[in-house]
Image (tube, grey):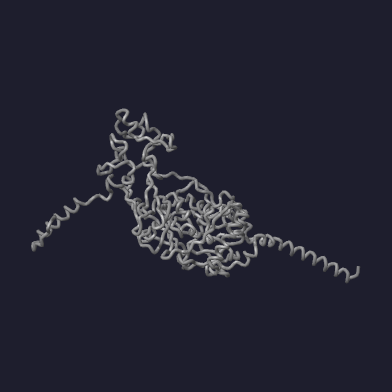
Amino acid sequence: MVVVTLSPRPGGSIAGALLVSTIAIRCAKPEISPSAEPAVAPSASASTGNASSIHVPERLLGLPTGRIDARGEPVSVACVTCHSLRRPAALPEKMTDLDEFHQGLSFRHGSLACGSCHVVGDQDSLHQADGTIIPLRDAIALCAQCHGSQYRDYQRRSHGGTNGHWDARQGPSVRNHCLDCHDAHTPKFLPSMPVLPPRDRGTVASQHPAAEAHAGHAGHAP
Amino acid sequence: MSDEKKRVTLKVLGATLGASAFAYAMAPLRHFTRDLTLDHFLQSHYRETTQAELAAIMKRLETETEHQYGAKVAIRDLKPQPGVQLGYALNLSLCIGCRKCAEACHVENNHDRDTNNSYIRVLEMESGSFDLERGDATYTHAVPAPGKYYLPVQCQQCDNAPCVTVCPVQATWKEADGIVVVDYNWCIGCRYCEAACPYHARRFNWTKPHVPAAEINPDQGYLSNRLRPQGVVEKCTFCLHRTREGRNPACLEACPTGARVFGNLLDPESDIRRVLATKRIFVLKEELGTRPRFFYFFDV
């Protein structure tokens, strides 16, 4: 506990302020908390306990094998299941260095390297920029490190799909995880085909130039 | 033949021709009365019915739907929630023009399958331009196309709605929570509202909507997504059969990028209020003074 004394000398008060601010900055926690609690706190409405929960994509919980067990649940394996069989190679520098497993992985994510996110020797964890180890399911903390504006919008439910209720008092809602839509290795989307447009009078006529030529004559809406 | 007889013959022939032409011209009207029962004809305006009368009307409509479409449906009447004013915002930086919102609207609101109708039109606009008249709603190429941005437009639930002002029979009005609704059984199909709307939000049922029984959404609201008859106007109701229970509208649930934000404008903690407070929001055709409830923004 620091006691700041009011000193008539300007040097003394500046030194006191410097001391307090140094201690304050050292004690301040980073905004993104480590894995002890969920990396992204579900936001709850002030008036109710219906929180907006975050869906965790299955592939973060384990590798899907395509098989189902006796209860009909899909079987997935932890990364360590294979990675404990033999000593793994060092993290590659380029995707083309992967010549035995994990082939077909494409990478287009700026100038990041494998080691920027993955932890050497622990495949079920990731590490943040300051070295904090987090479990694979908390990968949102990694995205938030660089993509802060998208993360801020995500917390306000104006980025990323939501299902459920707009009114937390009347029901829960579930938000997509970043990795529900974005592939962490190639996050940028390629163009896709849209749903087909309506075929009503307003749009069909505009697609047929011949109909437009007759529009004035017959009095149809263009 | 004498002149007198010729004139009589010609008059009779002319009258016969005229009468048959008249009958032929009036023939389509006979089809309008096929769905018109006495109960239908004597039904009061929604705002003048008691709860008991409305319950009987909804029961009758459920029976009619079963006869006409072969599907069992449940029509409810949800009242506006107190202390709620609904608003909608859309992030144009996230919209990729996939039209999944339009498709979700089509399915949720039991639209005519033949015209692939929807309350939402997604306009493909040139980047840097805001000329709505040049927006293209008929694109079928891969999206997002370079040099374009996408602007979904649906009913803006205007606070000063021109469609409400022009309706000659007051079949459309603004409810207490801000949604502009239509009583389909009171609408006479004059389409003045369709002409008055600056956002092309109104849809007219030129034909009886055709929806296969298996695809009908049975969770229906009297003022929103029940199966509409031929000859009435309809529009987006912010899915009031869902949103008046606190659920998301169908278009928001379908949006893959999360571009849509919905909520209560009176709740300062709501997502929509936070968007309005922190983003540079704008409305369409502001100069017309319609005061829409639908806000657009970009992320920059």
Q: Which quadrant holds residue B186? A: bottom right
Query: Compared with residue A179, is residue A93 higher up or lower down, i.e. above or below?
Result: above
Residue at 29% x, 32% y is A90
Rendered-image quadrant of the N terminus of chain B: bottom right
| Extreme-top residue of the structure | A86
- Quadrant location of the C terminus of chain B? bottom left
* Residue at the farthest right position: B1
Furthest-bottom residue in view? Answer: B4
Q: Judge whether residue B34 can be spotted in this image.
A: yes
Residue B49, x across and y down, in percent: 55, 68
Image position of A155 (left or right of B223): left
Residue B143 x %, y %: 47, 48
Percent of width and height locating residue B243: 46, 58
| Image-based side of A207 in relation to B179, left or right | right
Residue at point 37% right, 44% down?
Answer: A56
**x then y, percent, for residue A40:** 32, 49
- Nearest the viewer among A167 and B105 is A167
Please state the total of marks drawn on the protein image: 0
Task: Residue A66: name its quadrant.
Answer: top left
Q: In the image, is residue B25 above or below residue A30?
A: below
Q: Nearer the viewer, residue A94 or A211?
A: A94
Q: Which sits in the foreground, B206 or B143?
A: B206
Residue B137 visible from this viewpoint: no
Residue B156, above or below B103: below
Residue in front for this viewpoint, B285 or B30: B30
